[in-house]
Image (cartoon, grey):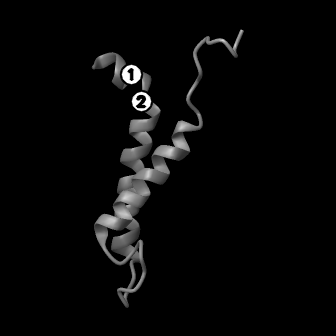
């Protein structure tokens, strides 16, 4: 478990920061009319932020020595 967390620390940090950012965006900007798909409810905005944050920081993950990296 500890090894998994260490290997995926950027992904986990990205998910947490993205979720917090999505929630803050919903709280401060949001959608007044309720017709916006992502920002009309806090859980939609938080989940979207978590996915985007995880995808963004996973770009910077170092690849270990494999068959393509020799």
Residue 51: x %, y % from top left: 44, 51
66 relative position to 38: left or right? right
1 relative position to 50: left or right? left
Asked which secondary structure carries label 1, the reply is: helix
Residue nearer the viewer, 65 or 67: 67
Q: Quadrant of residue 62?
A: top right
| Measured Cα–Cα span from mark 2 to mark 1 | 5 Å
Indicate whether 60 appears above or below 39. Answer: above
Dots 2 and 1: beta carbons under 8 Å?
A: yes
Indicate whether 24 appears above or below 4. Answer: below
Q: Determine which residue is flagged by label 2.
A: 9
Q: Residue at x 35, y 22 (%)?
A: 4
Residue 67: x %, y % from top left: 66, 12
Q: Quadrant of residue 32?
A: bottom left
Residue 13: x %, y % from top left: 41, 39
Indicate whether 54 appears above or below 4. Answer: below
Indicate whether 58 appears above or below 52. Answer: above
Q: What residue occupies the far bottom of the structure in this picture?
A: 33
Q: Determine which residue is flagged by label 1.
A: 6
Q: Residue at x 53, y 37 (%)?
A: 58
User: For mark 2, does the 10 Å Cα neighbourhood hold few (<14), some (14 to 19), or many (20 or more) residues?
Assistant: some
User: For mark 1, does the 10 Å Cα neighbourhood hold few (<14), some (14 to 19), or many (20 or more) residues?
Assistant: few
Instruction: Name the quadrant of the C terminus.
Output: top right
Q: Residue at x 31, y 74 (%)?
A: 41
Q: What residue occupies the far front of the structure in this picture?
A: 67
């Amino acid at each position: 478990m500890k090894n998994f967390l260490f290997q995926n620390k950027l992904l986990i940090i990205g998910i947490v920061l993205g979720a917090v950012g999505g929630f803050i965006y919903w709280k401060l900007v949001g959608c007044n009319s309720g017709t916006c798909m992502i920002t009309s409810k806090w859980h939609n905005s938080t989940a979207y932020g978590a996915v985007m944050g995880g995808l963004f920081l996973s770009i910077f993950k170092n690849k270990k020595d494999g068959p393509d990296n020799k």
